[in-house]
Image: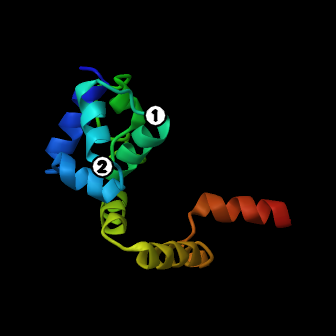
Amino acid sequence: MGIPERLVEIRERNGYTRKRLAEELNRPYPTITKYETGEREPGHAYIIEIAKKFNVTTDYILGIEKSPAPEKTSAGDERLDGIIKNYEELNEAGKDDLAKHAEHLTYIPEYKKCDSLLSKDAKIG
């Protein structure tokens, strides 16, 4: 499957029409059509934009990876998966607040991993 076919597959899997995608990305409809038919090759900026919008990797779009999903950052940690899911549902202000709260928790000793405390003590003593 080439880049044009992957672009179509990603768009359709997410329930988008070419028209809707063109409107949301502020791109001309004929340009989207040309990318998807292979008449025109999309630039790297468009590929990155599609990857971010639909949460796929650029490597998938380019045909390097077989799986569209980015690799998990945790080895099956359901808590982290839940946090990521919640994060993705927030607007920008909510994302900023979540990041601040998460950072704040790292300063509370009772929430620190033991190895983090030991390494700090080792530096002090």
Secondary element at image label 2: helix
x and y percent of residue 5 in the render? 22, 27
At 21% from the left and 55% from the top, the residue drawn is 20
Circle 2: is it few (<14), some (14-19), or many (20+) Cα within 10 Å? some
x and y percent of residue 28 in the render? 32, 48
Instruction: Indicate which disc residue 54 carries.
Output: 2
Secondary element at image label 1: loop
Q: Which residue is mark 1?
A: 43
Relative vertical location of residue 28 with respect to residue 96 in this rendering, above or below: above
Give whichever of 47, 56 is nearer the camera: 47
Amino acid at circle 2: Phe
x and y percent of residue 91 in the render? 38, 74
Circle 1: is it few (<14), some (14-19), or many (20+) Cα within 10 Å? few
Residue 110: name its quadrant.
bottom right
Give whichever of 35, 114 is nearer the camera: 35
At 57% from the left and 69% from the top, the residue drawn is 112
At 82% from the left and 61% from the top, the residue drawn is 123
- The C terminus sits in image quarter: bottom right
Mark 1 and mark 2: Cα distance apart in space: 17 Å
Which residue of the protein is positioned furthest toward the top in this rendering? 1
Instruction: Give the mark, 1 or 2, whose residue is nearer the N terminus.
Output: 1
